Image (cartoon, helix red, strand yellow):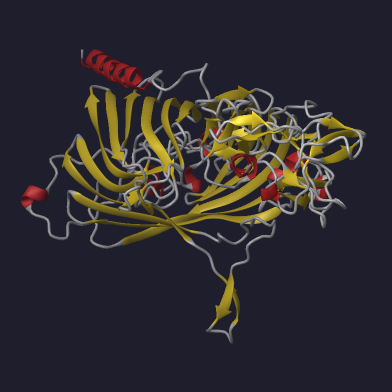
């Protein structure tokens, strides 16, 4: 139940990060990573922190050639991984939205969302980056949260997070949490190979890597992205690089990680390492065309703690409860096209899940079934030079989620989003979205239509 | 030439990834585990009629047992014998209409509900009764009774006519119990679901909202 609340909420009303606008400033040539001070670069979708001045660099530390890979979110901030720095860089982004659900409050579907129209502080993210040397780089991104405030408890009440404020006569003060979005160290072996170790955004498709709200065109994101058919983040090793072939450029990624899990950043409950890969080619067709394919294979496990019991002979032994565990594979294909102000992007993503024997998830009415989730979206927009560089855009998405307790046998989700994206200032983006989603599923939800309006101001600093 | 090589390289890598990933896990005709079946109306996997849920899977009942609620137990009218096999108990479950028709002690009590009587035994606690029975200690004379249909898999109206007459979340459950009385099958409790418009239900103990 909660899972599908999340599904739908993320897609249609949540003001979370959505799609990247890999559209540099209109005056900037595509691919000019050093130029854009505008929140929409994403020349590359590969995460890489900002280099700093080599602290203790030696001649042998110097890379043979400047790395061609850059992080879209960092380039937005004017952080250029090809330039050295001599300080710790602290930057970030934030967004404020106003959202309204346009369906009757008594509609069953409205139970899945916050039905009040609200102003929403969505993302408050900080980047802390530094070049340790010409080859070594460090990157940390944290997101500040109001959670767990507002979390629904089992008895239906909502969590209040207040504590006495010792600095103000013990009056109540609200506290929140911190999410470590990514933290990694990376090393440039040569111009074609960089090794990254830590927690990083999974290198798949377009949307997941360019995740900062200022670089994203709409304020909502597709179901297929929100459902994380690939893990959003992973912890482990990531090697990547790019190599030019004439006017073309071939990029690759390979990952070995803990895989998906409730504590994936610090505990691999099944000790089954996940493997992932991505290949992308940048072609000079039109202004720029990028085509990529991605794959992932891993095991998810969530289980209780080990139990010490005595066997038949009275010897104490350590047993591991099965919990919930499944093997999964994901694959995706993405296409990005730039032609002047025209921006087109599309992704098709699939995930197949197969539960292990005796480790199936309990859901309402029985057990979760194995199955395939396939989804796709296409986004088209055109960036004008005037009217705050407005970009009218539209997104169409079609999903076939797995069968489940909430949406029944083989549900279908169709969503259309249309809106405007303005850039009144290189670091400020204003968005206005109208989204309409239709869910075709089994009773009691049946055929539902959800409509929402979302406005958002996102800015980088 | 370089462009051709780049295309060729990308193609080879793409094929390699696709061949590793494609079809390895996807088995469209097999979406549930052992002793389960896919229930289309619910969109989930449920245990076969002769199996019960244990942890994250299903375990079949022994050949002489049936599913009673959430457990395997002997069918009504039977209990385990010395060989640990379910065997008919003389007199238990025999039809009756009035006291005196049940002559096999200790099943010499004729319990009549809805005009239908069956021989059973009097009791004080659940353990006085066979596994598939509950001690109906809310009755003037407590006796061992069963709840027909309880726990059976359903999708719509299959529960009609059973004691567990309401199909909800894929299973037949007992509706209309009395909160203070707790007139429910063994190991369940009467809970108030009136805010959901379905009144009171017997649900596994500890699962009340």
Q: Nearer the viewer, residue A37 or B77?
A: B77
Q: Name the quadrant containing residue B74.
A: top right
| Percent x, y of residue B64 | 59, 27
Report whether B130 appears left or right of A217.
right
| Percent x, y of residue B80 | 60, 35
| Percent x, y of residue A68 | 26, 38
The residue at the point 74 percent across, 30 percent down is: A443
The outermost residue toward the left is A59
The residue at the point 46 percent across, 47 percent down is: A212
Report whether A31 appears left or right of A225.
left
Q: Nearer the viewer, residue A242 or B52?
A: B52
Q: Nearer the viewer, residue A227 or A225?
A: A227
Above or below A95: residue B115:
above
Q: Is residue A118 visible?
A: yes
Above or below A180: residue A204:
above
Q: Is residue A406 visible?
A: no
Above or below A419: residue A100:
below
Counting every numbered tag in the picture gives: 0
Report whether A438 appears left or right of B8.
right
| Percent x, y of residue A179 | 45, 56
Quadrant, the N terminus of chain B:
top left
The residue at the point 55 percent across, 36 percent down is: B82
């Amino acid at each position: 139940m909660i899972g599908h609340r999340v599904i739908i909420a993320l897609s249609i009303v949540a003001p979370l990060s959505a799609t990247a606008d890999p559209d540099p400033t209109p005056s900037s040539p595509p691919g000019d990573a050093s130029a854009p001070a505008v929140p929409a670069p994403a020349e590359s979708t590969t995460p890489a922190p900002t280099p700093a001045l080599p602290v203790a660099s030696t001649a042998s530390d110097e890379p043979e050639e400047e790395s061609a890979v850059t992080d879209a979110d960092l380039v937005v901030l004017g952080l250029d991984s090809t330039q050295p720095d001599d300080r710790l860089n602290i930057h970030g982004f934030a967004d404020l939205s106003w959202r309204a659900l346009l369906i009757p409050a008594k509609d069953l579907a409205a139970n899945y969302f916050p039905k009040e129209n609200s102003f929403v502080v969505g993302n408050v993210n900080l980047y802390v980056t530094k070049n340790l040397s010409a080859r070594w780089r460090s990157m940390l991104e944290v997101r500040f949260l109001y959670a767990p405030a507002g979390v629904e408890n089992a008895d239906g009440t909502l969590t209040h997070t207040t504590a006495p404020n010792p600095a103000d006569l013990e009056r109540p003060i609200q506290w929140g949490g911190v999410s470590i979005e990514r933290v990694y160290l990376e090393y440039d072996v040569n111009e074609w190979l960089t090794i990254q170790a830590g927690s990083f955004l999974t290198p798949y498709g377009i949307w997941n890597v360019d995740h900062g709200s200022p670089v994203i065109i709409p304020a909502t994101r597709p179901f297929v992205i929100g459902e994380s058919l690939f893990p959003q983040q992973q912890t482990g090793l990531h090697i990547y690089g790019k190599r030019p072939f004439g006017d073309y450029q071939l990029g690759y990624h390979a990952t070995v990680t803990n895989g998906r899990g409730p504590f994936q950043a610090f505990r691999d409950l099944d000790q089954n390492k996940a493997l992932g890969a991505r290949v992308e080619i940048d072609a000079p067709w039109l202004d720029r065309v990028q085509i990529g394919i991605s794959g992932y294979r891993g095991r998810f496990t969530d289980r209780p703690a080990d139990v010490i019991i005595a066997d038949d002979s009275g010897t104490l032994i350590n047993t591991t409860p099965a919990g919930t565990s499944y093997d999964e594979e994901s694959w995706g294909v993405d296409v990005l096209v730039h032609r002047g102000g025209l921006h087109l992007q599309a992704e098709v993503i699939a995930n197949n899940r197969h539960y292990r024997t005796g480790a199936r998830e309990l859901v309402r009415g029985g057990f979760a079934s194995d199955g395939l989730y396939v989804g796709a979206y296409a986004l088209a927009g055109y960036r004008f030079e005037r009217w705050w560089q407005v970009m009218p855009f539209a997104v169409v998405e079609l999903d076939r989620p797995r069968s489940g307790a909430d949406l029944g046998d083989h549900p279908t989700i169709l969503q259309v989003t249309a809106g405007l994206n303005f850039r009144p200032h290189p670091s400020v983006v204003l968005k206005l979205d109208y989204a309409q989603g239709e869910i075709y599923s089994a009773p009691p939800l049946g055929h539902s239509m959800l409509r929402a309006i979302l406005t958002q101001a996102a800015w980088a600093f | 030439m370089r462009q051709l090589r780049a295309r060729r390289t990308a193609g080879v890598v793409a094929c390699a990834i696709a061949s590793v990933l494609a079809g390895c896990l996807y088995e469209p005709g097999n979406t549930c585990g052992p002793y389960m079946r896919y229930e289309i109306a619910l969109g989930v996997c449920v245990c076969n009629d002769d199996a019960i849920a244990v942890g994250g899977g299903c375990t079949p009942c022994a050949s002489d047992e049936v599913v009673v609620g959430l457990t395997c137990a002997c069918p009504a009218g039977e209990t385990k014998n010395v060989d640990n096999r379910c065997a008919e108990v003389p007199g238990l479950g025999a039809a009756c209409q009035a006291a005196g028709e049940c002559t096999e002690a200790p099943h010499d009590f004729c319990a009549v509900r809805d005009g239908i009587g069956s021989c059973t035994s009097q009791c004080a606690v659940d353990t006085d009764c066979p596994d598939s029975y509950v001690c109906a200690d809310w009755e003037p004379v407590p006796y061992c009774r069963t709840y027909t249909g309880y726990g059976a898999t359903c999708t719509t109206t299959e529960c009609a006519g059973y004691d567990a007459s309401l199909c909800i979340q894929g299973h037949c459950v007992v509706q209309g119990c009395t909160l203070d009385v707790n007139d429910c099958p063994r190991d369940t409790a009467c809970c108030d679901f009136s805010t959901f418009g379905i009144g009171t239900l017997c649900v596994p103990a500890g699962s009340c909202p």
